[in-house]
Amino acid sequence: MKHFITTLDWSREELQAFLDHAKALKADPIQPLLKDKSVALVFFNPSLRTRTSFDVGARQLGGHAVVLQPGRGAWPMEFEVGAKMDADAEEHVIEAARVLSRYCDIIAVRAFPKFENWEQDRRDHVIKAFAEYATVPVINMETITHPCQEMAHMLTLQEHLGQVDGKKFVLTWTYHPKPLNTAVANSGLIIASKFGMDVTLLCPTEDYLLDERYMNAASEYCSQNGHELTVTHDIEEAYDGADVVYAKSWGALPYFGRWDAEREIRDQYQHFIVDSEKMAMTNNALFSHCLPVRRNVKVTGEVLDSEQSVAIDEAENRLHVQKALMAGLIGD
Ligand code: CP
């Protein structure tokens, strides 16, 4: 049994096998690969795409999805081992994971960081606790990485570009009025570098560098593939000749828990918005974003509605890659 918590645990060949299966499922979507199987979808945070695509995907494969929202219709949960549970939590993840494993064949979990202390958040303790106590495979529906989004992104790039090796991939920080999770940014960096792309990270200042775990992994994958991970704060340098522009906003790690101070910095970089002028510097690049996206804040409506935008394709591909993942993790 193997969990799908981070693509760092999976080789490019293993991930490509999931992508190839996803392509086959996209062409022939209704198959009994999860016949009479159940999937628990545990959401600690909101969702539109993830919730719908997992539910629909399980049903298209003959299975059944159960959505649980701890604290909102399901019991609030404790994660600390040895905790005296005299506050709000009514049940411990130890029992929850074991019980759900008796009912369901897969447990999928969404648990965003708390945005107070990055050293604690980077432990990814919620999904790791589920993985420790579950006796069925656990899938990450977004914690400090978003591996299902990574897979959908790569499937979309392969569909539009064919071979992605050597293509210039730009992960650009964009402005957002709130400090957002770094998960998709971490994931974008990992999947593009793992699949041989020539990766550039564009962010306003050193404060917006991603966690060293993901920076180092991306750097290592790049060097294994004959590239060097480029980090720049120069918009023109980043966009020049790009084949892919992937946009995401995130909060600066050194300012976790001090968001008023971070906002003073963040507000200075609203011009990082993806617009047609910047896209004109590229090699007719594809544009994508994981969604949801704030139009005319992170990216202009003009870019989002252009033929270069593949964000809707990427959202659709969540369905296909997750079906391949669910079938593969509990496959015959
Ligand atoms: N991209 C993504 O995970 O969308 P949701 O938050 O709507 O699930």
Image: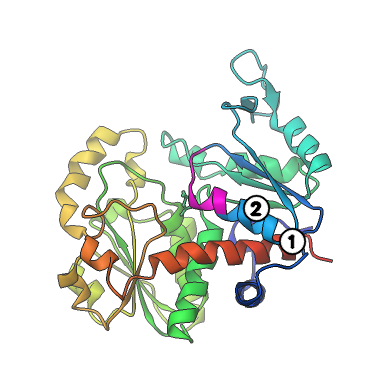
Q: Are marks 1 and 2 in contact (CB under 8 Å)?
A: yes
- Relative to 288, is 146 on the left or the right? right
Q: Secondary structure at mark 2?
A: strand
Can you say which quadrant of the picture contains the C terminus?
bottom right
Based on the picture, tell me whether residue 146 belongs to the magenta stretch: no
Q: Which residue is mark 1?
A: 329
- The residue sitting at the top extreme is 86
Q: Whole-percent x and y of residue 107?
A: 70, 47
Q: Kindly report the distance in space between the C-alpha atoms of the residues bearing marks 1 and 2.
A: 9 Å
Q: Which tag, 1 or 2, sits closer to the chain's start?
A: 2
Q: Is residue 283 above or below residue 129?
A: below
Magenta residues (range): 45-52
Q: Which residue is mark 2?
A: 139
Based on the picture, tell me whether residue 48 belongs to the magenta stretch: yes
Q: Secondary structure at mark 1?
A: helix
Q: Is residue 76 above or below residue 270?
A: above
Q: Amino acid at mark 2?
A: Ile
